[in-house]
Amino acid sequence: MRKYIISIAIIFISISSVIPFIYAVELDTLLNKDYLTSSEVIQNSDILDGYKITLRGEVVSEPIERDGFCWINVYDTQNFISIGVLTNVAMIEDIQYWGDHKTTGDTIDVVGTVYRADPKADGELDMHAESISIVQSYPSGPRDIVIPLWKIIIAIILFIGMIIVLAERFLSFIKRRNHQHEHVLEQYMDES
């Protein structure tokens, strides 16, 4: 029994000594990238907590202003997720186009610190901006919405299936109704 406890303790100590090394390698990889996306920041928030990074993405929705500061959302157009960024109102003056469901917004780089559980944001994950620069400014034109082919195929299959089920129900209803009319007619004929 004692051998098992010692073996488990050795395994636990070995694993716990390797984990910080793995995190350090992953942190180094993330910090050496030119920029990160919102999804990368969210997926690695436990590692990036308290570190300064560059976040790149599309600025979406309208800024929420309060006491000289504002919240903006930076959207990852590849993974369809955004992260909130707390910034000074003066830093967003150069942003011309704010994206929404129909239009594309400016692509920006935000240099700032990631907070996994920001006390200023009720413990939410966010980022505090130190600087914002515009990478590409889009005229407020329509957003290209691409629906994957597999979603179209599934929608067509479900639509055809729904039509088949409704047709079967309708034919079953007609058949029952005709049978009831025949039965009522037979009773009437028998009584006469």
Image: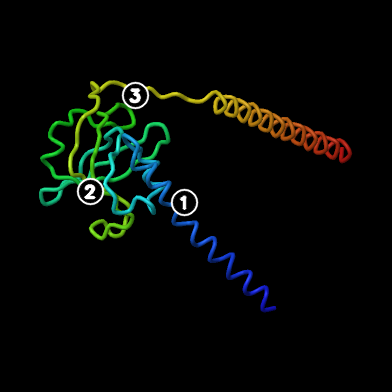
Alpha-carbon neighbours of circle 3 within 10 Å: few (<14), some, or many (≥20)?
few
- For the residue labelled by badge 3, is the local secondary structure a helix, a strand or a loop? loop
- For mark 2, does the 10 Å Cα neighbourhood hold few (<14), some (14 to 19), or many (20 or more) residues? some
Q: Which residue is mark 2?
A: 128
Question: Tag 3 or tag 1, which sits nearer the N-term?
Answer: 1
Q: Measure how far apart labels 1 and 2 are at the Cα level.
A: 26 Å
Q: Amino acid at mark 2?
A: His
10 or 115, nearer to the observer: 10
> According to the image, label 1 marks what residue?
22
Identify the secondary structure beneath mark 2: strand
Circle nearer the N terminus (3, 2)? 2
Determine which residue is flagged by label 3: 143
* Left or right relative to 131: residue 10: right
Q: Amino acid at mark 3?
A: Arg
Q: CA distance from mark 1 to mark 3?
A: 40 Å
Q: Could you give the CA–CA distance between mark 3 and mark 2, rounded to whole angstroms?
A: 28 Å
Q: Which mark is residue 112?
A: none
In this view, the residue in front, 139 or 21, is: 21
At horizontal 34% and vertical 31% (from top left) the residue drawn is: 101
Mark 1 vs mark 2: in front: 1
Residue type beneath disc 1: Ile
Q: Nearer the viewer, residue 105 or 15?
A: 15
- Give the x, y percent position of residue 51: 29, 50
Residue 61 placement, left or right of 183: left
Image quarter of the N terminus: bottom right
x, y percent for residue 32? 34, 39
Asked if marks 1 and 2 touch (Cβ < 8 Å), the reply is no
Q: Point out residue 104 in the picture as x, y percentages from the top left corner.
A: 30, 26
